[in-house]
Amino acid sequence: MRRETLRVSVVVLWVTIGWLAGGVSAQAATPVQRFAVIVANNRSLDEGVPPLAYADDDGAKYFELFQAAGVQLRFLAVLDPDAQQRYPEATAASLPPSSAQLQAALTTLFAQITQTQAAGIETHFYFIYAGHGGLAPNQEGYLNLLDRRLTRSELFREIVARSPATMNHLILDACHAYFLVQKRGQTSDKRGDFSAVVREFLRADELAAYPNTGVILAFSSTSETHEWASWQAGIFSHELQSGLLGPADLDQDGAVSYREIAAFVDSANAAVTDPTLRLRVYARPPASRVASPLFDLTPLTVMPTLNVEPSHAARYHLEDGRGVRLADFHPSGEQATRVALLGHAPFWVRTDDQEAVLAAPSGVVAVGSLAFAPLEVARRGSVEQSFRRYLYHTPFSVGFMQGMQAMGSTEPLLDLVEVAPGPAPSTHWLRIGGFTGLGGAVVAGGLGAVFYAQANHSYSAYQRADSIPEARELRQTTDQQLQVAQVLFGTAVGLAVTGGGLLVWEWLTAE
């Protein structure tokens, strides 16, 4: 008997394991299609704010990266002459970053997303912005389009709330501008407090309403992020793009998570001591699926790849034949690091004092197989020297990521940098909706009573009818009036329940 019980248990165990394995395999095999709108705008609508130098370049590099990853794109930007020469494909695909073009791009992609999901395919939608941001007099953050400001509330209402995608990802490189190295803009907020913009732009209560939406952005202790002429890019966008080419994939699972990319950007800036230059990252994955990756590296595996062996760990940067700075990274030497060579050959692989050339790479190229030669670097200016000396000075490692997570949050994969919550959203609309529902219930109930009384009157006349045709007509009238009364009574009950529920909700959420 015991042996038979054991056999049954073993069979049940194997069936369970098989079912679980099948479930995992099915989940892993679930197809995913990705869509993105990339908006890059050098100009601000705010008076006296100078244009950015490299937001258009940032947008073009996002275009190349996401296109290589198989993402269906809409690219909104006006590239300057230098960028047009450097990125001809992105230029050909670009449209002006106006309000009308943004709405058209969203409408087209959202329709495609709906059709894709109807075919049983999971969808991810990215909204990527590089350019000027600001803070309105009502303390609401906004992004600059060519012809209008896109406020935080409009971002949620017109983009996030409208998106039919399974998951949404917001990548925002926007704060106040100025450029030389280049400081992004001159804030109209005299306090220079960019943390206020973060709170207003992404209030936790707003983001919590969309649990399928994640966000990543950067900020500093002042209202400034930076552009750097040596990179011809915004610091945050370049660091983010560098990590998404592969160096941020610490667990080497073929995808970059929010936690990994946030820690990668933080490690790049960890050694910068000047608080006006050091960026910090705000990252929050979708609450409904905190393990959802920000970026899938699988499509990039078909490209030539640079492999940095642990014994060759150092601070590296890559440049392609166009002079485009592709990536910067500093592996710790705990494990090999792979970087997709996205761009135009030849490629230059540089450390602080050496460089090697890859004329026509294919497959996986080991750094240890390269012939490095001495490199002379001219350093000039305090900010230039600060960036050259300290950016990517700290190696990126598992220990660094775990340390940043421990410092930022006790919950896994949540905010790596704590941002004080903004004021609680107003709940007056709950009260308005509640009383409106109750008022509608009274009106519907009153009309129902009127039709019910008319039905009684018609029924009395039906009973006194002198002829069959008259009786038939009165009976039909009675039935119709009763049906209308029933619909109105049902409507009244529904409105009363809804209105009462909204008032209870308002009472429960009131402080």
Image (tube, rainbow, N blue to C red):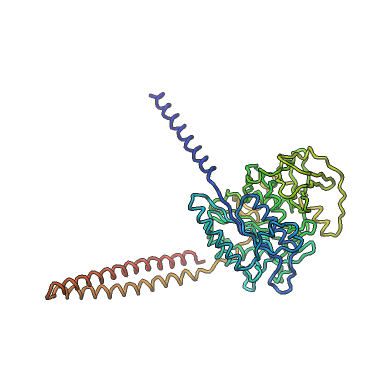
Task: Inspect this view and state whether residue 174 appears.
Answer: no
Instruction: Residue at 86%, 55% (x, y): give it.
Output: 379
The number of numbered discs placed on residues in the rendered structure image is 0
Q: In the displayed structure, would residue 453 be above or below residue 342?
A: below
Instruction: Pick whichever, 22 or 141, lies toward us.
Output: 22
Q: Residue 336, how many percent across, how many down?
A: 71, 40
Q: Residue at x 44, y 30 (%)?
A: 11
Of residues 162 and 265, the one nearer the viewer is 162
Image coordinates of residue 1 in percent, x first then y, are: 38, 24
Q: Is residue 41 left or right of residue 120?
A: right
Q: Position of residue 495 (x, y in %)?
A: 38, 68
State the residue in front, 257 or 498. 257
Q: Is residue 445 visible?
A: yes
Which residue is pictured at 49% across the width and 50% down the height? 119
Residue lying farthest to the left in this orientation:
466
Task: Indicate the position of residue 38 as horizontal and vertical percent values.
Answer: 64, 59
